[in-house]
Amino acid sequence: MNNQKRVAAIHDISGIGKCSLTAAIPVISAAGIETAAMPTAVLSTHTGNINGYTYRDLTTDLTPFALHWKSLGITFDGIYSGFLGSIEQVDIVCDFIDMFRTDKTVVIVDPAMADGGKMYATFDKEFAKEMTLLCRKADIIVPNITEAAFLLDEEYHEPPYSKDYIEDILKRLSLLGPEMVVLTGVAFNEYELGCAVYCRDADEIFYSFSKKYPGIYYGTGDLFASALTGAYLNGKSISESAEIALEFTNFAIKRTYEAGTDTRFGVNFEQGIADYIKRLGGF
């Protein structure tokens, strides 16, 4: 039997909201991969459309975390970063990648900082400029359309989009450094929502779409990126990984929509984990 793979998941942890580490740990673990959690901040809830949340910045803890892991001889098959608690954390995560990366390590960066045309409450445009440094170190980046606009320092545009617009964004994002770009929030009409995948070396673009449900579904970007990470580290191609991640995320949205629950508190992905495992081929 092959040795179990291990991923370092560098995200915040929000007690309520089914996002960041509370999505990454169960989903990547379901993919049969050990998930080593490095929390960047601790919040009572996520920051989207919820007032009064608590927030504790863990910037000063990250380097001691990394040094302790290094002293134990810990190695990683994947490094997966998401929501960072401060602008200073970008440099710390860059150093983490330099410390632990090997020829076999896949670095996946979800530049989680914006959605719907706006930065998250704790960030500004300076943060976006700093985030480009982290994207340069990635093998794969997974931005949404808003994050792509901030990374490229351009104006955000509302959907629907043209293929030319999406493909121009994909190629310009790849020039930041990553070999593969997975862009979410892609919509060519009002009925479907999906993702576009660009592989620079092959100069190939893939699309995958699913039914669009009305409303805003918080945490789905983290869910998608986590499912993609689990699939890719199980040997799926980047296009297959994106398709699996989109299907998993879409069914979670469907269950939440049909149940009529408060979408601020996350989507029902838990009841789709068994199907996700089957899509990966089981273990």
Image: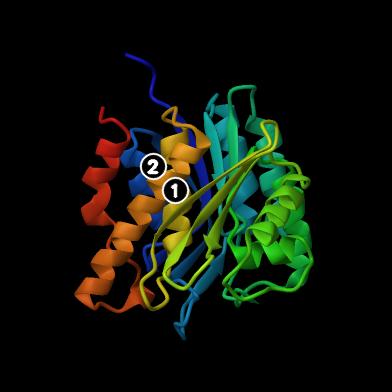
Name above or below for residue 105 compared with residue 9: above
Determine the CA span between mark 2 and mark 1.
Answer: 6 Å
Q: Which mark is residue 28?
A: 2
Whether residue 45 sits left or right of residue 59 in the image: it is left
- The residue closer to the viewer here, 251 or 230, is 251
Q: Nearer the viewer, residue 50 or 185?
A: 185
Please indicate whether residue 44 sits to the left or right of residue 62 in the image. left
- Residue that carries the numbered disc 1 in the rendered image: 226
Describe residue 276's horizontal placement relative to residue 233 as left or right: left
Q: Residue 271: give x, y in percent of width and height.
A: 21, 55
Task: Say which amino acid is labelled 2.
Answer: Ile
Sooner in the amino-acid sequence: mark 2 or mark 1: 2
197 relative to 45, above or below = above
- Indicate the quadrant containing the C terminus: top left, top right, bottom left or bottom right: top left
| Residue drawn at (63%, 31%) of the image | 100
Q: Secondary structure at mark 2?
A: helix
Q: Are marks 2 and 1 in contact (CB under 8 Å)?
A: yes
